[in-house]
Amino acid sequence: MTAGLKTRNCRWIDVRGAVDERGRINFFEAGRDLPFHPKRLFWLHHIAPGQWRGRHGHRESELVFVPLHGGCRVHLDDGRTKETVSLDDPARALFVGTWVWHELTDFAEGAAIMVIASTYYEDAEYLRDYDVFKREVALQDAGGRP
């Protein structure tokens, strides 16, 4: 796995694969390549020009973003550090852990992004209000619980 991100609970994951004269193949194996056992897969596609996805954080879910076609920019914020990265290489996935506000923007035409989640969908664990996110992250940093 590669590193290089400043945001807490985030890192790049090199996606294993192979190449020959027919093309390339990349893959994850549950229990080997991901930092969790997947509970949910979903994908973003046909994003209208100028639109965004995400714009929230999670109390429990960990995510891995894989650009299957095209790419986008991902804005990360852990309550202390903010950074923006390009997600555009299908051989490099982005791990986003808990307590990280994330927003995806600037989708390339025809982009398709797969997201692998550590949890089943549960609306209550989403942090959709940025001010609430900031307060809860500060509580976590202080050793408290929101």
Image: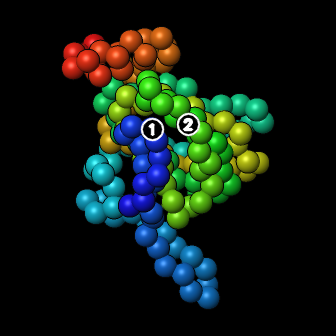
Drawn side of residue 94 relative to residue 52, left or right: left
Inspect this view and state whether residue 61 appears: yes
Residue 124 occupies which quadrant of the picture? top left
Amino acid type indicated by mark 2: Glu
> Can you identify the residue that label 1 sits on?
7
**Circle 1 SS class:** loop
Q: Residue at x 47, y 46 (%)?
A: 5
- Image position, residue 84 (x, y; %): 59, 39
- x then y, percent, for residue 1: 38, 61
- Residue 62 image-quadrant placement: top left
Q: Position of residue 86 (x, y in %)?
A: 62, 48
Compared across the picture, whether 77 is left or right of 141 comes to right
Give the residue at x 33% y 61%: 33
Residue type marked 1: Thr
Instruction: Tell me what residue is drawn at x 62 percent, y 88 percent.
Output: 21
Q: Residues within 10 Å of mark 1 (few under 14, many from 20)?
A: some
- Point out the tag, 2 or 1, that comes first from the N-terminus: 1
Judged left or right of residue 136, residue 23 is: right
Q: Are the two marked residues, 2 and 1, in contact with CB atoms closer than 8 angstroms?
A: yes
Residue 81 lies, with reference to residue 10, above or below; the image says: above
Q: Which residue is mark 2?
A: 83
| Colour logic | rainbow
- Label 2 secondary element: strand
Q: Say the numbered circle drawn on residue 67.
A: none
Which residue is at 35% across, 17% downward?
A: 138
Which one is in front, 39 or 75?
75
- Return the x and y of residue 95 as percentages of the image width and height: 42, 47
